[in-house]
Amino acid sequence: MLFDIGWPELMLIGAVALVVIGPKDLPRALRVAGFWVRKARTLSREFQGSIDQMIREAELEEVREDLKKAAEFDLEKEIRNTVDPTGELAQTIKPPELPDYFEEPGAATPAIIEEAPATEEAPALAAPAEAGLPEPAPSAESTPEPATQPSNPPEPSSTAPAADADSAAPKP
């Protein structure tokens, strides 16, 4: 029971209440006491529920933060930081910057090349560029040569003439 009160203690409290309050007002006093006990239990239940809800929200917020950290986790960055924390290795692997020999010094490269209007001058400008290129020479590899039969018949193998020579030679 509540506050470790047993049956003998309850009977003593009931007897004192009967003597002090009286038999006429005792039922109404018990109703009021029951109302206040019920109200105290409701308040304690609400308080416990709100505490449990705050704990769940705090845990959910921690779980949300953990999930957000896991979603934002950059595996490539972590590996790079683990392998090369100072960046020294990346600098040694980085290819050297080569100068652009085709760019004229002091000339800015245009970001967008505008197309020339279709006039007669445009093909005339393109013709000298094409004329400056040499024509490719026909290569011998491009035309296959026909297969020819050798003029000399193949020589017989070394075992075959010996057999023919034995059969053609007179027997003694």
Image (cartoon, grey):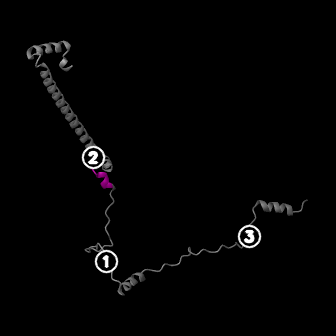
Using the numbered discs, state the Cα–Cα distance from disc 3 to disc 2 in whole angstroms: 86 Å
Per the rendering, the mark at residue 114 is: 1
First to last magenta residue range: 86-92
Q: Which residue position is annotated with label 2? A: 68
Examine the residues drawn in magenta and state their main secondary structure.
Answer: helix
Q: Nearer the viewer, residue 62 or 125?
A: 62
Amino acid of disc 3 = Pro
Q: Is residue 99 left or right of residue 2?
A: right
> Could you tell me which residue is drawn at 30 percent across and 47 percent down?
71
Q: Which residue position is annotated with label 3? A: 153
SS type, badge 3: loop
Q: Where residue 139 appears, x then y in whole percent?
A: 54, 76
Q: Is residue 140 left or right of residue 54?
A: right
Using the numbered discs, state the Cα–Cα distance from disc 2 to disc 1 in whole angstroms: 48 Å
Indicate which label's residue lies in the foreground, 3 or 2.
2
Q: From what the image shows, is residue 104 above or below residue 36?
A: below
Q: In this view, does 144 lie to the left or right of 75?
A: right
Q: From what the image shows, is residue 36 above or below residue 132?
A: above
SS type, badge 2: helix
> Could you tell me which residue is drawn at 22 percent across and 37 percent down?
53
